Amino acid sequence: MINLTFLTFFFLALSQTIWRRADLWSDSMALGKVGWIAGAGGVSPSPRAAVSTRAGSWPPQGGRAGEQGGAEPIAGTEITFGSAFVSRTGCYVRKVVNISFGLLIAYLSIPVVLNLLSSRQVMNTSFSPLRIVNTYGAFGSITKERTEVILQGTSSLDPNDPAAVWEEYDFKCKPGELKRRPCFITPYHYRLDWLMWFAAFQTYEQNEWIIHLAGKLLAQEEETLSLMATNPFAGRAPPRWIRAEHFKYKFSRPGGKHASEGRWWIRKRIGPYFPPVNLQGLKKFYEDRNWPYPMRD
């Protein structure tokens, strides 16, 4: 199939070829006419004379118009006009090709623009048999709700104790604390927050790295904590257990009850994402994957 890259280079190469052909044709005409005029005047033609003529230096070096070895001024003027005419022709041809190609792209882009304005966009699709114009994008639309994985830690000896207090880790950008407004991510991209969003679409078995992250938080590794917005166990002993909860988030309604309380988000618990884990229980998990076992300071 013909694609946009091929057609672009084809038409540009064609226009450049026509331009160069026309330029060479004008040079040959100028050189031929100089030879004819010089022969009539009794001197042999030379390429230097032709170049001088094209550069606008008239009469050529070696004589004045009307003298021996010179040429008629009217003939020199004729050479300049003929050369310029052919050059202009090549320029016009190239402009016609470029404009025609631009109009073709504009015409074929009409369904693409209509798709862009549609509420039901189609992504990664070609809209013509030639595949000249296409759509590309990771997401054709943005949902009004999103699922999030929230990491929580506790210092309780028994993670199943109803009285255990679970404290949440906040990330630098992704939704977590209900009263924290959405952040601006431009131009820096928070890769860990981005990965956490994708992990929420799947299970922790499909994203083993999140268990790796939990182990580093249990050990309170400084490098890992630098990727977090808050550490609820800062300045005290590390958590004994960490678990992940699955929530569904959506924006609060402006002027509504939750917004009046300063909440940007409304969330509803879906269920557990992964069960409580401790550092000792993760040792075999790390060994089986040849991961370095995190050590507490």
Image: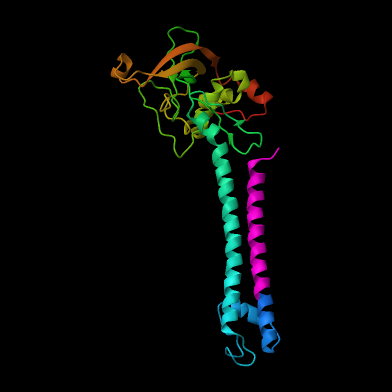
Q: How many numbered marks, from 0 up?
A: 0
Magenta span main SS: helix
Q: Nearer the viewer, residue 32 or 199?
A: 32
Q: Is residue 122 visible?
A: yes
Q: Is residue 296 visible?
A: no
Determine the residue positioned at 47% across, 15% down: 247
Q: Magenta span has 29? A: yes
Q: Residue at x 64, y 29 (%)?
A: 291
Instruction: Decide: is 167 above or below 228.
Output: above
Name the image colouring.
Answer: rainbow
Q: Give the magenta-colored segment's residue range.
A: 1-30
In the image, residue 66 lies in the stretch drawn in magenta: no
- The image position of residue 237, as x and y in percent, is 45, 24
Instruction: Locate residue 108, reporting x and y percent.
Output: 57, 37
Say whether residue 227 is left or right of residue 60. left
Most extreme residue toward the top is 162
Residue drawn at point x = 64 percent, y = 25 percent: 286
Quadrant location of residue 260? top left
Quadrant housing the N terminus: top right
> From the viewer's perspective, is residue 240 above or below residue 77?
above
Front in this rendered view, residue 11 or 211: 11
Horizontal arrangement in the rendering, residue 197 relative to residue 36 (left or right): left
Q: Is residue 45 left or right of residue 76?
A: right
Where does residue 295 sit, x and y in percent of width and height?
56, 29
Determine which quarter of the picture holds residue 27.
bottom right
The residue most toward the bottom is: 68
Q: Up-down: is 22 above or below 194?
A: below
User: Residue 231: image x %, image y %?
Assistant: 43, 27
